[in-house]
Amino acid sequence: MTGMKTFLMPDRRRFLKTAGAAITASLATPYVVRAQEKILYVNTWGGPWEAAAKTHLIDPFTAETGIQVKTVSPVSFAKLAQQVKTGTYEFDVTTLGGGELVRANQAGIIEELREPYKGGLFQNGVASHAFATVMAWRTDKYKETPKTWADFWNVEKFPGGRSLQRYASRVIPIALLADGVAVKDLYPLDVDRAFKSLDRIKKHVRVWWTAGAQSTQVLRDGEIDMIGIWHGRYFEAEKAGAPVAMTWNQGEIERAYWVVAKKTPNLENARRFVEFATSAKPLADFSKAADYGALNPASNEFVAAADAKRMPTSPDNYKLTFEQDMVNFGIDPAELAERFEEWVAS
Amino acid sequence: MGVSLSKLTEKTDIWPWLLLAPLGVYMLIFFVVPLADVAIMSFVEPKVSFANYQKVLTGALYQRVFLNTFLTAAFVTLCCLAVGYPLAYLMAHSKPRTAMLILLLVTMSFWTSFLVRTYAWMVLLGNNGPLIAFLQMIGIEQPPQLLFTRFSSTLAMVHILAPYMIMNIYSVMKKIDPALIRSAESLGAKGWSLFRHVYLPLTAPGIANGSVLVFVICLGFYVTPVLLGSPREQMIAGLIGHQVDEFLAFGLGSAMAMVLLVITLVILTIYHRRFGLDKLWG
């Protein structure tokens, strides 16, 4: 079946699966069988993410195991679900965020995995790397340094355009912090209070960004003056020479987990890859190259002090941040998203 | 006679059908079957019920977004007409070289990827863009916000869709017999009256064709309004993508797609009754 992966595009249907199985069976040669044993399809985000993964995870993995890796992008949660439904696999492993992971595990579309390092397994996903939604601003606009999300909400002291991600489960905790809720009381989320808090900032939010590149662009070009942005995307704006600054304080950390598609034909290769990708050295190198923070504590010894400053998981930064808690979330994320979209549109 | 003629053609008629067969099979596998799958999913995901349709048809969010989608499409169509009609007239009635030049400009913009055109508008209308700089230069200290408004998204969508309107109207205008205009003039029609009673009715098929194409294509837009528009502008296509990709709500997404499809078909049917769908392609 692996041969079909490259040919069948997103909408693989049941009848195609049957037809595909028949064709592959009739064409099957010993060579094809051998190829199946030594191949793995990895779902990536493409672009710089894939470049970093290729250099630090995929190539060393192939060198060590002899398993050929092909990449498929972009990451699609919907595709992961469809693969299991149709039985036609375009990729064997992918990464998911915490909220998606909980949903994927409930839906039974991912395989059970072993714990590769202590505390590394959560809902059948292996914690790999983390990113943070942090507060960043234009230094040409503000003389004083904003410190908290409450400052972000304070348009009298810090007048100017704002931007946040159009993504309910990331924005709601931030809105609560801005309203004075302490991090320890954040979960389960008080959704009504969060929307009241959001009402106050709404008319100042000029852009609800939806794509990472878009967030870098509006900050870099000064379309807005203050933004809630992924830390990696912030560094891109900084690297481009824009007059910008950020704080790790009250940064919202989210974890990315490697998962294996349920019933994939390359199950053993997939498991080996996940263990390799979350082992100390490869993960440290990948996290550094892709501007993430490594979640395997053993990776820390492979990260230089200068690089650690750019990582949300380094001890100095981590203590300023807080983590998303998808288990005690307090509301169904889909329901929350619907309410949020309705709120944005009204 | 009718009977014998149809008998005569019956035998030879098999050839066109045979030639069409590969296309028919292709359409069946890659269009009809997936579409049927979407239709089925809208009723059976996550369980067999009308719940998805109930949500789409009665939920405040979905009603609002559907309404916004259709109003946006209608407004963009009107703007395309307002811009496209004079331009098509200019193309149809100026010297060949001028007409050629305009045609070239219109098609060149048509061939440029719509994403590139969307980003180009971001640069032009941005806070540090040339338009704002110009406004400041001529003494407007607090220039209005141009980007991320309904104005910017409408402007970009009109820019992207206007070629469909222009080409449709142009092809109709080109075919108008000049003798008709001359005879109208000789019968005393002048200026506005000539346009209102002779020229406009003659170009009506082009207007109708262009409008339907622009309207229907615009219904499926979402990248442009999301990137350029105000936060309130959500198109139905964006909401469908959101539901499917983030929440695996295949049933709900399918139900929205089916409602959009049915409304679009109703519009096309009304159009067909009035003008004939076959005329859409000239």
Image (spheres, coloured by chain):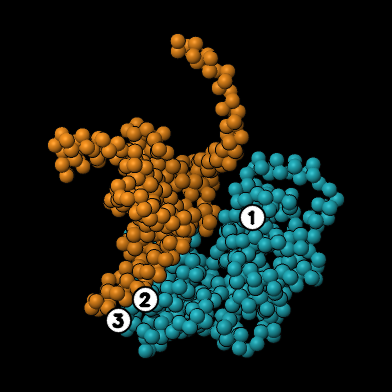
Task: Report whether mark 3 lies on the same chain as mark 1.
Answer: yes
Which residue: 67% across, 50% down? A7
Q: Amino acid at mark 1?
A: Ile
Which residue: 32% across, 46% down? B92
Q: Is residue A126 visible?
A: yes
CA separation in Å, label 3 and label 1: 48 Å
Question: To which chain does the residue with label 2 belong?
Answer: B
Q: Amino acid at mark 3?
A: Glu
The chain coloured orange is: B
Which residue: 24% across, 40% down? B199
Counting from the top left corner in percent of width and height, residue B226 is at: 41, 61
Counting from the top left corner in percent of width and height, residue B150 is at: 32, 61
**Which SS class for mark 2?**
loop
Counting from the top left corner in percent of width and height, residue A121 is at: 67, 69
Tell how many labels: 3
Q: Which residue is mark 2?
A: B128
Q: Residues within 10 Å of mark 2 (few under 14, many from 20)?
A: few
Q: Which residue is mark 3?
A: A156
Q: In which quadrant of the rendered view does residue A272 lie?
A: bottom right
- State the mark number for residue A109: 1
Tag 1 or tag 3, which sits nearer the N-term? 1
In the picture, the quarter occupied by the C terminus of chain B is top left
In this view, which residue lies farthest toward the right? A30
A232 relative to A83, above or below:
below
Q: Residues within 10 Å of mark 1 (few under 14, many from 20)?
A: many
